[in-house]
Amino acid sequence: MDAIPGRPETTGSTVVYRNPWMSVREDTFRRPDGSAGVYGVVDKQDFSIVIAEADIAGSGPAFHLVEQYRYPLSRRAWEFPMGTWPAGAGGSPLELARAELREETGVRAEEWRHLGHLNEAGGFCSQGFDVFHATGLTAGVHAREASEADMVHALVGEDEFGAMIDDGRVVDAATIAAYLLLLRHRARPST
C-alpha cells in the first residue's frame, strides 16, 4: 500500500459568490511538496433523504417517490423525498427527514433507522446527506413549498423502482446511493 501523503495547507480563501442556498469559494493552498494550488469549492448545507418503504400485500416492498423538474438538468426526475432546512430553521438530520417526508408526500412514519451519512460530490462540494429508512407509514396531506408546486408523488414497487434506475427515470445519485445503503443493511444478519 502506498504511503498516505500529507494534507495541503490552506493559504487563503475568498467567497466569490453567495445566495441563500449556497456559496462558492476559491481557496489557495500549498501541497506537502511545497507547490501551490487553487481549488473552487461549493458550500451547501447538508440534507436528509428518506426511503419511505411500504409493504404492498402480495407485491412486496414499495417506495414513496417524488418527481419534479430539476432546473440544472433541464428535465423532470424521480427521487426519494429529500431536502434541507429553510433559511433560519434548523434541527437534527432526523427532524429534517421527518419534515421533508411529511412536506413532500404527507406520509408519516412510526419507525426510523439511520442508514448512514454520505457526501454528495466530494470533488467540488462540501455538502453531505443523511440517509433514513422509514417504515410503519401513515398517509396524510402534503404541505409542499411554492417551489415544489409541480411535484408528483407515487408509491412504486421495488421491481419498478429498479426498472426506473435502469431506464433513466431515476438519475439522482443520492437516491441511488441511498438505495444501495438500504440493500447493504438488508443483507446484514440481524443481531
Image (cartoon, rainbow, N blue to C red):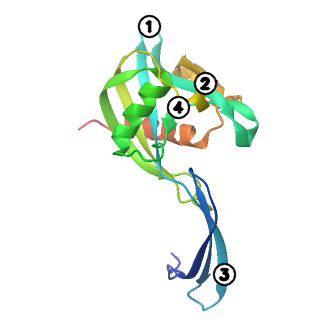
* Other residues around mark 2 within 10 Å, as few (<14) / some (14–19) / many (≥20): some
Which quadrant of the figure has residue 115? Answer: top left
Give how far apart the Cα atoms at labels 2 and 4 are. Answer: 12 Å
Residue 187 seen anywhere in this rendered image of the structure: no
The structure residue drawn at horizontal position 52% and vertical position 54%, both measured from the top left corner, is: 127
* Other residues around mark 3 within 10 Å, as few (<14) / some (14–19) / many (≥20): some
Give how far apart the Cα atoms at labels 3 and 4 are. Answer: 37 Å
Q: If you read the primary sequence from the N terminus, does the residue marked by circle 1 or circle 4 appear first? A: 1
Image coords of residue 36 (percent x, y): 65, 86
What residue is disc 4 on? Answer: 80
Q: If you read the primary sequence from the N terminus, does the residue marked by circle 2 or circle 4 appear first? A: 4
SS of the residue under disc 1:
loop
Give how far apart the Cα atoms at labels 3 and 2 are. Answer: 42 Å
The label nearer to you, 3 versus 1, is 3
The label nearer to you, 2 versus 1, is 2
The label nearer to you, 1 versus 4, is 4
Left or right: 39 with respect to 117? Answer: right
Q: If you read the primary sequence from the N terminus, does the residue marked by circle 3 or circle 1 appear first? A: 3
Which of the labelled discs sits on residue 58, or is there none? Answer: 1
Q: Are marks 3 and 2 in contact (CB under 8 Å)?
A: no
Which of the labelled discs sits on residue 37, or is there none? Answer: 3
Amino acid type at circle 2 is Met
Which of the labelled discs sits on residue 151, or is there none? Answer: 2
Amino acid type at circle 1 is Gly
The structure residue drawn at horizontal position 40% and vertical position 32%, both measured from the top left corner, is: 99
Amino acid type at circle 4 is Phe
Q: If you read the primary sequence from the N terminus, does the residue marked by circle 3 or circle 2 appear first? A: 3
